[in-house]
Image (cartoon, helix red, strand yellow):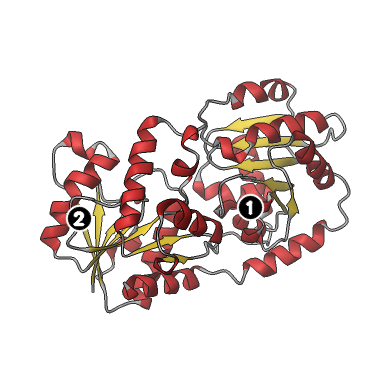
Amino acid sequence: MKIGIDARCLEWRRGGVSRYLISMLKLWPQLAAKHRFVLYFQNYIPDDEFLRHPNFQLKLLKGPKVLRSHRILAEQFLMPSQMKSDNLDLFFATWYSAPLLYRRVKTVIAAWDISYSTHPKHYSWVHRISLGFFSRKSCERAAGVITCSVFDAEQIVKHYKVPPQNIITVCFAADQRFKPERNLYEIDRVREKYNLPSCFILSLGVIHNRRNVDVIINSFAQLKDKFPEFSLVVIGRISTNPYIDIEGMMKPMVQEERALYLSWIEDEDLPALYQAAHSYICTSTVDGETFMLKEAMQSGTPVITSPLLKGTIGGHGLIIEDPESIENTSDVLRIAMHQDPERDQRIEDGIKWNRQITWERAANESIAFIESR
């Protein structure tokens, strides 16, 4: 089978989608050697070594710069002609939507969540169209949809009317570079590089309204005087709509040297960052999955999350029943920062549970689903 893949996410600042795709591209040549893969890029081809496999053909989209400067325009107007000339058997759209003007090739869509449709007020009108409209139409027409949690699959069935038998849920895994064995040299290096406090609660990830980072900040502010040894570290690009002034909220605590905000951290520093943290917190009222919780657990760092994400950690963490409540969040943070008698057991159970979830399993399930279409 000749499979086309939208690999443009590898050109952009890499996050969850790119981590999934990188893992698939590293494993599929061995697990599915009979297939040939055509990888499409928008403006440049990354120099990653794993892309130089003989089963891969790498192609740049051709067309006017104005079209190549926008993701959705390149996808809808440049991708179809390239797909047609390559005579594909199937196209795998990794970033929520696929070309709607070319319907001669079966398509599998990766729709990791559809919050842009279920919670449109959290997005600008541009993203409501480029993600919401095109994702809905792509999923409706697709031969299959891949997503990452039972909750997200249920949302796709409910809001996009995709038959359940056309959807598969694959579990994201933490990379093997995240390990519980502490590397003290790396921890000290990262602590010095980013001026991290000695003991801190970590919030890491793109800051959306649904992730309640403002609630976490206010909750910690209420507790900081009772736990003077603790600080709060928030790392992530602010992408709130309506806008929340995260930096402004944190400014008083930053001035007291009880908090730190960073918009970004180098990917290579993540393992040591997790290990430097006392606890990692990530809550959501929309997301059914997140890489970061598993990465923290696999690094030996206890996690705090909300009921919607309880499944992604196997229940091995502290749960904030109402993540939009400052009172509830404060209560759980107080347990985490106090002498928590179950802390060590949760760390051990989290590490054991996390080892059951592998990229090999995700790669096998993904390619088998694609082949079945």
Of tags 1 and 2, the one toward the viewer is: 1
- Residue type at mark 2 is Lys
Q: Is residue 362 above or below residue 195?
A: below
Q: Where does the image place residue 36, in percent across and percent down from the top left? A: 24, 71
Along the line of sight, the residue nearer the viewer: 193 or 128: 128
Gap between marks 1 and 2 measured at Cα: 39 Å
Disc 1 is placed on an element classified as helix
Q: Where does the image place residue 351, in percent across and percent down from the top left? A: 68, 65
Q: Earlier in the sequence, mark 1 or mark 2?
A: 2
Q: Which residue is mark 1?
A: 308
Image quarter hosting the N terminus: bottom left
Q: Is residue 186 visible?
A: no
- Residue type at mark 1 is Leu
Q: Which residue is mark 2?
A: 59
Q: Quadrant of residue 329?
A: top right
Disc 2 is placed on an element classified as strand
Give the residue at x 68% y 49%.
306
Q: Is residue 57 left or right of residue 333?
A: left
Disc 1 crowd rating (10 Å Cα; few below 14, some 14-19, many 20+) is: some
